[in-house]
Amino acid sequence: MAGRTALLLAYAARYRRKKGEVRLMGAAAAPHHTAERLLSDRFARGEIDETEFETRRAALRRN
């Protein structure tokens, strides 16, 4: 289980780097970046599976 969690965390971190997410102290993130980050975090914690992650991410990107 620990190995899976580590893998999911690494995937979520790599995903954020690919998206070019920049964190600035005191700067508010764009709403969809925040939503995608929360979604990635839920996936990394194992709260949602890959299918749900991909479906919800696609929905966020459509809007």
Image (cartoon, grey):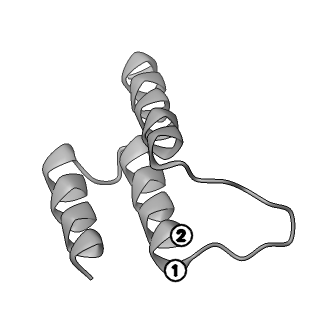
Give the position of the C terminus as an image quadrant.
Answer: bottom left
Give the number of marks.
2
Read off the residue under disc 1: 31
CA separation in Å, label 1 and label 2: 5 Å
- Name the one closer to the observer, 27 or 6: 27
Q: SS at mark 2?
A: helix
- Which residue extends farthest front? 20
Q: Residues within 10 Å of mark 1 (few under 14, many from 20)?
A: few
- Name the one closer to the observer, 51 or 61: 61
Residue 38: x percent and y percent? 48, 63
- Amino acid identity at mark 2: Thr
Q: Residues within 10 Å of mark 2 (few under 14, many from 20)?
A: few
Residue 44: x percent and y percent? 42, 42
Q: State left or right for residue 15 relative to residue 48.
A: right
Residue 55: x percent and y percent? 15, 62
Read off the residue under disc 2: 34
Q: Residue at x 38, y 23 (%)?
A: 1
Checking the image for residue 2, the label placed there is none
Q: Residue at x 66, y 54 (%)?
A: 22
- Amino acid identity at mark 1: Pro
Q: Are marks 1 and 2 in contact (CB under 8 Å)?
A: yes
Q: Is residue 14 above or below residue 35?
A: above
Q: State left or right for residue 4 relative to residue 37.
A: left
